[in-house]
Image (spheres, rainbow, N blue to C red):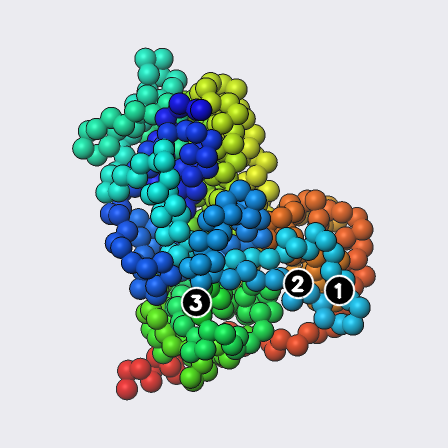
Amino acid sequence: MNCTTVAVVGGGLSGLAAALALADHGFTVRVLERAPAPAPAPVGTADWPVRSSAPQTGHSHVLTSLGLRLLRKRAPDLLEAALEAGAEVLDLTLSAPSAPGAFVREEADVELATLAVRRIVLDEVLHRAAASRPGITLSYGTAVRGVRLDGSGRRPVGVVTDTGELVPAAIVLDATGRRALSRTWTGTTGGTRTGPTAVRVFTRFYRLTDPSARPGPLNRGNAAGGIWDHYAAVVHPADRGVFAVSLGTLTGDRATGPLRGARAFTAAARLSPGIAPWLASGVSEPLTAVRAITSPPNTLHTSPEQDGRPYGVYAVGDAACITDPLYGRGMSLALAHAFHVADLLAAHPVPDAAQRARAADLAEELLRPWYQQAEQDSAARIRSWRAAAGSGTAGGSATAGGSGTAGSPEAVPPTVLPTGRPALAEIAAAAHHDATVWRGLTRVLMSLSTPDAVFDDQGFRDRVRGAARRPVGMPAPPTREELLQTITAAEQGARV
């Protein structure tokens, strides 16, 4: 039995997952979360409140195949609880190339599935599991102000709360999300790699009138819609007949600002391929107002031995790495990282240089490939969206509420692909007709296989370049001019 005490700072998805994984290994865990405890409510209800410390929980989320595989193998009780709360497993092979004989199911394709569930529901499943698990203490309404180190200044003895309480702990996990507060606590704020996402997301949740009837096909496997050359529009099914519609536009794009209003949002969503059937009269009803949020940049905090961080203080989830939300990797990477960190600490429970080096190696292996891919994908998308928008964007950053501020646009690093690697758009086009390309692309998009393992394989590249480029059934998205005309007409109608 492990007697080490771990303080997990942050009670969101990665913090609770880490606590549960650590408790499975016999650690004593204290979770400290600055937000109040969730109010009692049935799991899966539509009105479960969004956590004030994590506004992104009120937006659309995806649990990719990586996250579902982890739950199946490591936490089947959590998966069962999510399914009881109304979550649904979606079979991605239903969106494989449909031409006769084009796709033959393989044994490994059982992994090509995702879990349709709202973030607030999955968070509540984790909360309930942690609250009932021996060895875990949940302290809500408790903010942490710093880490207390031993006399050597190299190892933690605990964390200090905003009331001055010292919470003893030999190991501290930073699960504070994008704030990554441990870098401030330990004075190690350098060594961070970032690349812009430059995306503002508008989201609204709905409930189907008939939860058993899907209004339209999921052309993206776990979603309908697309990421096009000047905006994105996607439907994500969730639990109990609930689904989210999310529209993504450039940060600072004033012309698309009216999407905060229900009329402009609905008109733009219905104009987008794959979305209209879900919002047809009588098919669904809105559950929330339109929520707007500006995404943080792609971020990777570098190895702890490089920035002088003490032994035994490690970041998990978004505190370690953030990737572009349009590609939906965040929840699954956070879950995987939390469980792998717990495994590492169980195998090497003494905070020392060897433990820290292994934590650094884990982050490099698990997180860096996806940060790099997100950086490349974001850069290509930003250039396309900026070219389409022309002078219609203000550039600069925006607040969490989605308001753009004028200024110079964020610098977009050049998209540097390994020699000979086809662009993502080229791979996606080939995937409509070649099952091998589709399978490889899907495994990358679902975080099961790294980009270099698939995209840099010569046989895969040859198939991409040899695949047909025939158009597929999804209609073309509106032009930017058509989109803006629709937004303007809806906004003016709302003012009449």
Looking at this view, name the residue that lies furthest to the top: 151
Q: Residues at badges 1 and 2 in contact (C-beta under 8 Å)?
A: yes
The numbered mark, 2 or 3, whose residue comes first in the sequence reads 2
User: Residue 37: x and y, percent?
Assistant: 26, 48
The residue nearer to you, when weighing 432 against 168, is 168
The residue nearer to you, when weighing 154 against 70, is 70
Where, quadrant-wise, is the N terminus in this rendering?
top left
Is 407 rendered above or below residue 266?
above
Nearer the observer, disc 2 or disc 3?
3
Residue 389 tag number: none
**Which residue was labeled with disc 2?**
93
Is 292 rendered above or below residue 12?
below
Q: CA distance from mark 1 to mark 3?
A: 31 Å
Q: Amino acid at mark 2?
A: Thr
Q: CA distance from mark 1 to mark 2?
A: 9 Å
Q: Quadrant location of residue 409?
A: bottom left
User: Residue 481: x and y, percent?
Assistant: 49, 77
Residue 240 tag number: 3
Q: Amino acid at mark 1?
A: Phe
User: Residue 422: x and y, percent?
Assistant: 71, 54
Q: Residue at x 81, y 61 (%)?
A: 466
Looking at the rendered structure, the number of numbered marks drawn on it comes to 3
Q: Please tell me how crowded label 3 is: few (under 14), some (14-19), or many (20+) other residues with Cα within 10 Å.
A: many
Q: CA distance from mark 2 to mark 3?
A: 22 Å
Q: Is residue 319 visible?
A: no
Where, quadrant-wise, is the C terminus in this rendering?
bottom left
User: Residue 281: x and y, percent?
Assistant: 43, 84
Q: Is residue 462 visible?
A: yes
**Which residue was labeled with disc 1?**
103
Q: Quadrant location of residue 246?
A: bottom left
Looking at this view, name the residue that lies furthest to the left: 163
Q: Residue at x 24, y 32 (%)?
A: 161
